[in-house]
Image (tube, helix red, strand yellow):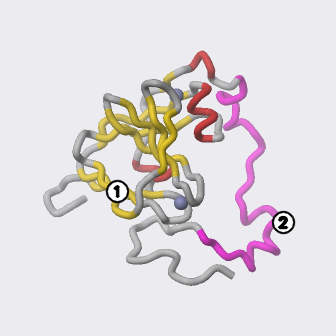
Amino acid sequence: MSLDNKPVYTGGCQCGAIRFRVEGALHHASICHCRMCQKAFGSFYAPLATVNEGTLTWTRGEPKRFKSSSIATRGFCADCGTPLTFEADDGVALAIGAFDDPAAVMPDKQWGIENKLPYVDTLHELPAKRTEDDEEVSPFLADLRNYQHPDHDTEAWPSEPKQ
Ligand SMILES: [Zn+2]
Ligand SMILES: [Zn+2]
């Protein structure tokens, strides 16, 4: 929340070259199963939150854009490839996973279900494990260095050279 009680959302790409800020309530949040969203996100579907006009600011960098159809443009980080936007005449939508707190942006509608992948509805039934409970990965997790931008704004990034 800002001082005048407006909700504030921040986020950005994985490498931190691009950061955004939304001041005020989001317009709407949904997932889209259409084939173009699957391809653009490299995923089963696209989670997207549309912003109200005039509430979005790019606070570091700006997405590179690909015109994916005659009516839509998709923004992404040219440095790390993180999908960031879906943009059309009626507004801009941001990728929910790119928000610093994606848990705060809950979708309430699905689009393009004619292209929904057949296993999407049963994914939650797959065998599941916490990362720290996986004995095969724990030895190298101890030495892992994380180069992902943290889930908050930073003065400068990266803060130290990669090793
Ligand atoms: Zn990036
Ligand atoms: Zn779509």
On the question of residue 95 being in view, the answer is: no
Q: Which residue is drawn at 41% across and 55% down?
A: 62
Which residue occupies the foreground of this view, 81 or 139?
81
**Mark 1: secondary structure:** strand
Residue type at tag 1: Trp
Residue type at tag 2: Glu
Which residue occupies the foreground of this view, 144 or 94?
94
In magenta, the rendered stretch is: 118-147
On the question of residue 28 being in view, the answer is: yes
Circle on res. 78: none
Which residue occupies the foreground of this view, 43 or 88?
88
Q: In this view, does 23 lie to the left or right of 43?
A: left
Image quadrant holding the C terminus, namely: bottom right
Give the percent coordinates (x, y) of residue 144: 71, 75
Give the percent coordinates (x, y) of residue 161: 60, 82
The residue singled out by tag 2 in the image is 135
- Marks 2 and 1 sit apart, C-alpha to C-alpha, by 41 Å
Q: Which residue is drawn at 34% across and 54% down?
A: 9
The residue singled out by tag 1 in the image is 58
Q: In this view, does 1 lie to the left or right of 162?
A: left
Q: Which residue is drawn at 51% across and 49% down?
A: 76
The residue positioned farthest toward the top in the image shown: 114
- Mark 2: is the Cβ under 8 angstroms from ligand 1? no
Reply above or below: 11 against 124: below
Reply above or below: 153 against 6: below
Sooner in the amino-acid sequence: mark 2 or mark 1: 1
